[in-house]
Image: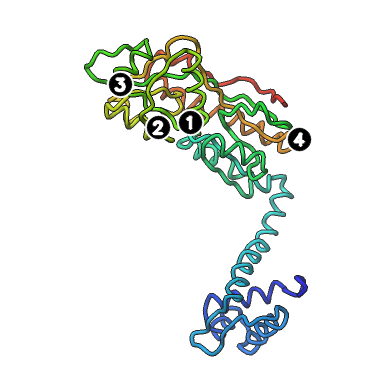
Amino acid sequence: MQPSALDFRSLEVFAAVCRLRNMTLAARQLKMTQPAVSQTIKRLEGITGVVLIDRSQRPLTVTTAGLFLAQAASQTLNDMRQIPIALRHIDRGLELRLRIGLVDSLSDPFVPELVNQLHASIHYLSVINGVASLVRAGLLDRTLDLIVTNDPMDDADGIVRHPILVENYVVVVPRTGAKLPLTDLTALGRKLPLIRWHPRSRTGSDIERQLRRMGVNIERRFEFDSSAAILSMVSSGLGWTIVPPLSIFESRMLLRNVRILPFPGARFVRQINLFARAGELEATASRIADMSRQILRERYLPELVKMGGWLEGHIVVSKQQTAEAH
Protein backbone atom coordinates (compact mmCIF):
# COMPACT_ATOMS: atom_id res chain seq x y z
CA MET A 1 0.00 0.00 0.00
CA GLN A 2 1.29 3.45 -0.94
CA PRO A 3 0.63 6.06 1.83
CA SER A 4 -0.26 8.58 -0.90
CA ALA A 5 -3.29 6.45 -1.79
CA LEU A 6 -4.91 7.42 1.51
CA ASP A 7 -6.33 10.84 0.70
CA PHE A 8 -7.77 13.38 3.14
CA ARG A 9 -11.39 12.99 2.02
CA SER A 10 -11.36 9.19 2.27
CA LEU A 11 -9.96 9.36 5.80
CA GLU A 12 -12.57 11.97 6.72
CA VAL A 13 -15.37 9.69 5.42
CA PHE A 14 -13.98 6.66 7.26
CA ALA A 15 -13.63 8.62 10.53
CA ALA A 16 -17.25 9.78 10.28
CA VAL A 17 -18.54 6.22 9.67
CA CYS A 18 -16.53 4.94 12.67
CA ARG A 19 -17.83 7.75 14.87
CA LEU A 20 -21.52 7.40 13.86
CA ARG A 21 -21.58 3.61 13.19
CA ASN A 22 -23.95 4.33 10.33
CA MET A 23 -23.18 5.07 6.66
CA THR A 24 -26.44 6.93 6.04
CA LEU A 25 -25.83 9.30 8.97
CA ALA A 26 -22.22 9.77 7.86
CA ALA A 27 -23.35 10.59 4.32
CA ARG A 28 -25.85 13.15 5.63
CA GLN A 29 -23.23 14.82 7.85
CA LEU A 30 -20.68 14.95 5.01
CA LYS A 31 -23.30 16.01 2.40
CA MET A 32 -22.67 12.90 0.31
CA THR A 33 -24.84 10.07 -0.94
CA GLN A 34 -24.89 6.82 1.00
CA PRO A 35 -23.58 4.81 -2.02
CA ALA A 36 -20.62 7.25 -2.31
CA VAL A 37 -19.75 6.66 1.35
CA SER A 38 -20.00 2.89 0.88
CA GLN A 39 -17.76 3.05 -2.19
CA THR A 40 -15.18 5.09 -0.27
CA ILE A 41 -15.01 2.45 2.48
CA LYS A 42 -14.68 -0.35 -0.11
CA ARG A 43 -11.88 1.59 -1.84
CA LEU A 44 -10.04 1.98 1.48
CA GLU A 45 -10.39 -1.76 2.13
CA GLY A 46 -9.01 -2.44 -1.34
CA ILE A 47 -6.03 -0.12 -0.72
CA THR A 48 -5.24 -1.55 2.72
CA GLY A 49 -6.03 -5.16 1.88
CA VAL A 50 -8.01 -5.68 5.11
CA VAL A 51 -11.65 -5.54 6.20
CA LEU A 52 -12.27 -2.29 8.08
CA ILE A 53 -16.04 -2.46 8.71
CA ASP A 54 -18.06 -5.53 9.66
CA ARG A 55 -21.28 -4.89 7.73
CA SER A 56 -23.01 -8.02 9.06
CA GLN A 57 -23.86 -6.36 12.35
CA ARG A 58 -26.06 -3.40 13.25
CA PRO A 59 -24.95 -0.88 14.19
CA LEU A 60 -21.85 -1.29 12.04
CA THR A 61 -18.88 -2.75 13.88
CA VAL A 62 -15.35 -1.52 13.28
CA THR A 63 -12.74 -4.28 13.04
CA THR A 64 -9.47 -4.19 14.98
CA ALA A 65 -7.68 -3.02 11.86
CA GLY A 66 -10.40 -0.42 11.33
CA LEU A 67 -9.99 0.90 14.88
CA PHE A 68 -6.26 1.34 14.27
CA LEU A 69 -6.92 3.22 11.02
CA ALA A 70 -9.65 5.34 12.69
CA GLN A 71 -7.25 6.42 15.44
CA ALA A 72 -4.50 7.23 12.95
CA ALA A 73 -6.99 9.01 10.68
CA SER A 74 -8.28 11.17 13.54
CA GLN A 75 -4.75 12.33 14.42
CA THR A 76 -3.87 12.91 10.75
CA LEU A 77 -7.03 14.89 10.07
CA ASN A 78 -6.47 17.03 13.15
CA ASP A 79 -2.85 17.73 12.13
CA MET A 80 -3.87 18.61 8.58
CA ARG A 81 -6.58 21.00 9.80
CA GLN A 82 -3.95 22.77 11.92
CA ILE A 83 -1.63 23.40 8.97
CA PRO A 84 -3.37 26.55 7.61
CA ILE A 85 -3.60 28.01 11.12
CA ALA A 86 0.07 27.27 11.77
CA LEU A 87 1.12 28.80 8.43
CA ARG A 88 -0.76 32.00 9.25
CA HIS A 89 1.05 32.17 12.61
CA ILE A 90 4.41 31.72 10.90
CA ASP A 91 3.55 34.38 8.34
CA ARG A 92 2.81 36.80 11.22
CA GLY A 93 6.21 36.06 12.76
CA LEU A 94 4.85 34.00 15.68
CA GLU A 95 6.49 30.93 17.21
CA LEU A 96 4.86 27.76 15.92
CA ARG A 97 5.50 25.58 18.99
CA LEU A 98 7.03 26.02 22.43
CA ARG A 99 7.44 23.30 25.08
CA ILE A 100 8.56 24.51 28.50
CA GLY A 101 9.61 22.46 31.55
CA LEU A 102 9.53 24.03 35.03
CA VAL A 103 10.98 22.83 38.30
CA ASP A 104 8.03 21.79 40.47
CA SER A 105 8.31 24.69 42.96
CA LEU A 106 7.07 26.98 40.16
CA SER A 107 3.41 26.42 39.31
CA ASP A 108 0.78 28.81 40.65
CA PRO A 109 0.77 31.77 40.02
CA PHE A 110 3.91 31.38 37.86
CA VAL A 111 2.37 29.22 35.14
CA PRO A 112 -0.86 31.24 34.64
CA GLU A 113 1.14 34.48 34.55
CA LEU A 114 3.61 33.07 32.03
CA VAL A 115 0.89 31.62 29.80
CA ASN A 116 -1.04 34.89 29.94
CA GLN A 117 1.98 36.73 28.56
CA LEU A 118 2.85 34.10 25.94
CA HIS A 119 -0.39 32.74 24.51
CA ALA A 120 -0.95 35.50 21.95
CA SER A 121 2.47 35.03 20.37
CA ILE A 122 2.71 31.21 20.19
CA HIS A 123 0.56 28.81 18.18
CA TYR A 124 1.06 25.76 20.42
CA LEU A 125 2.24 26.04 24.03
CA SER A 126 2.96 23.14 26.38
CA VAL A 127 4.09 23.59 30.01
CA ILE A 128 5.02 20.77 32.39
CA ASN A 129 6.11 20.81 36.04
CA GLY A 130 8.39 18.16 37.44
CA VAL A 131 11.52 17.27 39.35
CA ALA A 132 14.78 18.68 38.01
CA SER A 133 15.88 15.35 36.51
CA LEU A 134 12.67 15.14 34.47
CA VAL A 135 12.90 18.62 32.95
CA ARG A 136 16.64 18.19 32.36
CA ALA A 137 16.03 15.00 30.38
CA GLY A 138 13.35 16.77 28.37
CA LEU A 139 15.75 19.47 27.21
CA LEU A 140 18.49 16.99 26.36
CA ASP A 141 16.25 14.59 24.44
CA ARG A 142 14.53 17.50 22.66
CA THR A 143 11.04 16.83 24.00
CA LEU A 144 11.28 20.25 25.70
CA ASP A 145 12.52 23.47 24.11
CA LEU A 146 13.57 25.30 27.27
CA ILE A 147 13.55 24.65 31.00
CA VAL A 148 13.58 26.67 34.23
CA THR A 149 15.36 24.59 36.86
CA ASN A 150 17.73 24.44 39.82
CA ASP A 151 19.91 21.89 38.01
CA PRO A 152 23.12 23.77 37.06
CA MET A 153 23.48 21.69 33.84
CA ASP A 154 27.26 22.05 34.18
CA ASP A 155 27.94 18.78 32.39
CA ALA A 156 25.70 19.51 29.38
CA ASP A 157 27.26 20.90 26.20
CA GLY A 158 25.61 23.29 23.77
CA ILE A 159 23.35 24.81 26.42
CA VAL A 160 22.70 28.53 27.01
CA ARG A 161 21.99 29.72 30.57
CA HIS A 162 19.84 32.71 31.56
CA PRO A 163 20.16 33.47 35.32
CA ILE A 164 16.77 33.94 37.00
CA LEU A 165 17.02 33.85 40.80
CA VAL A 166 19.27 33.01 43.77
CA GLU A 167 17.66 32.09 47.09
CA ASN A 168 19.08 31.11 50.48
CA TYR A 169 17.84 27.85 51.96
CA VAL A 170 15.86 28.21 55.19
CA VAL A 171 14.99 26.01 58.15
CA VAL A 172 11.30 25.46 58.97
CA VAL A 173 10.28 24.22 62.42
CA PRO A 174 6.91 23.69 64.12
CA ARG A 175 5.53 26.70 65.96
CA THR A 176 5.37 24.95 69.32
CA GLY A 177 6.11 26.02 72.87
CA ALA A 178 8.95 23.52 73.18
CA LYS A 179 12.42 25.05 73.35
CA LEU A 180 14.35 23.93 70.27
CA PRO A 181 18.09 24.37 69.55
CA LEU A 182 17.47 26.50 66.46
CA THR A 183 21.08 27.22 65.51
CA ASP A 184 22.47 23.70 65.93
CA LEU A 185 21.12 21.31 63.29
CA THR A 186 22.61 18.21 64.91
CA ALA A 187 20.94 19.05 68.24
CA LEU A 188 17.72 19.95 66.46
CA GLY A 189 17.82 16.54 64.75
CA ARG A 190 18.00 14.86 68.16
CA LYS A 191 14.89 16.73 69.32
CA LEU A 192 12.75 16.24 66.21
CA PRO A 193 13.02 14.16 63.02
CA LEU A 194 14.34 15.88 59.91
CA ILE A 195 11.65 15.73 57.19
CA ARG A 196 13.84 15.11 54.17
CA TRP A 197 13.33 15.63 50.46
CA HIS A 198 13.53 12.41 48.50
CA PRO A 199 17.16 11.94 47.37
CA ARG A 200 16.10 11.58 43.71
CA SER A 201 15.23 15.30 43.71
CA ARG A 202 17.90 17.92 43.02
CA THR A 203 16.89 19.82 46.15
CA GLY A 204 17.19 16.68 48.27
CA SER A 205 20.65 15.79 46.95
CA ASP A 206 21.89 19.38 47.40
CA ILE A 207 20.71 19.44 51.02
CA GLU A 208 22.35 16.09 51.79
CA ARG A 209 25.66 17.29 50.35
CA GLN A 210 25.49 20.45 52.43
CA LEU A 211 24.80 18.50 55.63
CA ARG A 212 27.78 16.22 54.92
CA ARG A 213 30.02 19.26 54.36
CA MET A 214 28.90 20.60 57.74
CA GLY A 215 29.47 17.23 59.44
CA VAL A 216 25.78 16.99 60.37
CA ASN A 217 24.60 13.39 60.64
CA ILE A 218 20.88 12.98 61.34
CA GLU A 219 18.93 9.72 61.43
CA ARG A 220 16.84 9.08 58.30
CA ARG A 221 13.17 8.61 59.11
CA PHE A 222 10.94 10.52 56.70
CA GLU A 223 11.43 11.36 53.01
CA PHE A 224 8.93 12.96 50.64
CA ASP A 225 9.05 14.17 47.04
CA SER A 226 6.84 17.25 47.34
CA SER A 227 7.16 20.48 49.29
CA ALA A 228 3.45 20.34 50.20
CA ALA A 229 3.86 16.97 51.93
CA ILE A 230 7.05 18.07 53.68
CA LEU A 231 5.58 21.32 55.01
CA SER A 232 2.37 19.57 56.05
CA MET A 233 4.47 17.23 58.19
CA VAL A 234 6.22 20.18 59.83
CA SER A 235 2.94 22.04 60.30
CA SER A 236 1.58 18.98 62.11
CA GLY A 237 4.53 19.05 64.51
CA LEU A 238 6.03 15.81 63.21
CA GLY A 239 9.46 17.21 62.43
CA TRP A 240 11.44 20.06 60.86
CA THR A 241 12.88 20.61 57.41
CA ILE A 242 15.27 22.52 55.17
CA VAL A 243 13.72 24.11 52.07
CA PRO A 244 14.30 26.86 49.50
CA PRO A 245 11.85 29.76 50.03
CA LEU A 246 10.09 29.23 46.68
CA SER A 247 9.00 25.82 47.91
CA ILE A 248 7.14 27.46 50.80
CA PHE A 249 5.13 29.75 48.57
CA GLU A 250 2.41 27.29 47.58
CA SER A 251 1.95 26.08 51.16
CA ARG A 252 1.80 29.50 52.77
CA MET A 253 -1.58 28.66 54.33
CA LEU A 254 0.40 26.44 56.72
CA LEU A 255 2.63 29.26 57.94
CA ARG A 256 0.59 29.95 61.05
CA ASN A 257 1.80 26.59 62.37
CA VAL A 258 5.51 26.95 61.54
CA ARG A 259 8.49 29.24 62.00
CA ILE A 260 10.89 30.10 59.16
CA LEU A 261 14.49 30.58 60.27
CA PRO A 262 17.79 31.40 58.52
CA PHE A 263 19.96 28.42 57.64
CA PRO A 264 22.81 28.37 60.17
CA GLY A 265 26.47 28.42 59.22
CA ALA A 266 27.94 28.90 55.78
CA ARG A 267 25.79 30.44 53.03
CA PHE A 268 23.71 27.75 51.34
CA VAL A 269 21.82 28.82 48.22
CA ARG A 270 19.79 27.48 45.34
CA GLN A 271 20.09 28.99 41.88
CA ILE A 272 17.26 28.98 39.36
CA ASN A 273 18.21 29.38 35.69
CA LEU A 274 16.48 29.16 32.34
CA PHE A 275 18.26 26.87 29.87
CA ALA A 276 17.84 26.49 26.12
CA ARG A 277 19.84 24.80 23.40
CA ALA A 278 22.48 27.03 21.81
CA GLY A 279 21.41 28.49 18.49
CA GLU A 280 17.71 27.69 19.00
CA LEU A 281 14.90 30.03 20.06
CA GLU A 282 17.46 32.55 21.33
CA ALA A 283 15.16 35.60 21.25
CA THR A 284 12.26 33.61 22.74
CA ALA A 285 14.43 32.20 25.55
CA SER A 286 15.68 35.68 26.42
CA ARG A 287 12.13 37.05 26.42
CA ILE A 288 10.82 34.26 28.67
CA ALA A 289 13.76 34.71 31.03
CA ASP A 290 12.76 38.39 31.38
CA MET A 291 9.13 37.38 31.96
CA SER A 292 10.19 34.86 34.60
CA ARG A 293 12.22 37.47 36.48
CA GLN A 294 9.32 39.90 36.33
CA ILE A 295 6.81 37.36 37.67
CA LEU A 296 9.12 36.37 40.53
CA ARG A 297 9.93 39.97 41.36
CA GLU A 298 6.33 41.21 41.31
CA ARG A 299 4.29 38.23 42.47
CA TYR A 300 6.59 36.08 44.61
CA LEU A 301 9.04 38.37 46.38
CA PRO A 302 6.46 40.59 48.16
CA GLU A 303 4.64 37.51 49.50
CA LEU A 304 7.85 35.79 50.58
CA VAL A 305 9.08 38.87 52.42
CA LYS A 306 5.74 38.95 54.28
CA MET A 307 6.56 35.48 55.59
CA GLY A 308 9.63 36.91 57.29
CA GLY A 309 11.03 40.41 56.87
CA TRP A 310 14.54 39.04 57.24
CA LEU A 311 14.06 37.13 53.94
CA GLU A 312 14.51 40.38 52.02
CA GLY A 313 17.98 40.17 50.52
CA HIS A 314 18.03 36.39 50.94
CA ILE A 315 16.04 35.99 47.71
CA VAL A 316 17.54 37.86 44.77
CA VAL A 317 16.04 37.99 41.29
CA SER A 318 18.81 38.26 38.72
CA LYS A 319 19.18 41.51 36.77
CA GLN A 320 21.53 39.88 34.29
CA GLN A 321 20.22 39.98 30.75
CA THR A 322 23.20 38.37 28.95
CA ALA A 323 22.93 34.65 28.33
CA GLU A 324 25.92 32.42 29.09
CA ALA A 325 26.79 29.49 26.85
CA HIS A 326 28.54 26.32 28.03
Query: Which residue does the image show at 57% across and 79% down from the upper left?
Result: 63
Gap between marks 1 and 4 measured at Cα: 34 Å
The residue labelled by disc 1 is 199
Whether residues under marks 1 and 2 lie with C-beta atoms below 8 angstroms apart, the answer is: yes
Looking at marks 1 and 2 on the same chain, the residue that comes earlier in the sequence is marked by 1
Residue 269's tag is none
Left/right placement of residue 23 relative to residue 260 reads right
Q: Amino acid at mark 3?
A: Leu
Q: Amino acid at mark 1?
A: Pro
Query: Which residue does the image show at 28% across and 25% down from the upper left?
Result: 256
The residue labelled by disc 4 is 279
The residue labelled by disc 3 is 192
Coordinates of residue 127 in the picture (x, y in percent): 55, 43
Give the mark toward the camera: 3 or 4: 3
Query: Which residue does the image show at 48% across and 31% down from the upper left?
Result: 199
Helix, strand or loop at mark 2: strand
Looking at marks 1 and 3 on the same chain, the residue that comes earlier in the sequence is marked by 3
Q: Amino acid at mark 2?
A: Glu
Looking at marks 1 and 4 on the same chain, the residue that comes earlier in the sequence is marked by 1
Query: Which residue does the image show at 46% across and 17% down from the upper left?
Result: 211
Q: Quadrant of the N terminus?
A: bottom right
Q: Is residue 114 above or below residue 49?
A: above
- Closest to the observer, 181 or 19: 181
Q: Amino acid at mark 4?
A: Gly
Looking at marks 2 and 4 on the same chain, the residue that comes earlier in the sequence is marked by 2
The residue labelled by disc 2 is 223
Instruction: Give the colour scheme shown.
Output: rainbow
Q: Quadrant of the C terminus?
A: top right
Gap between marks 3 and 4 measured at Cα: 50 Å
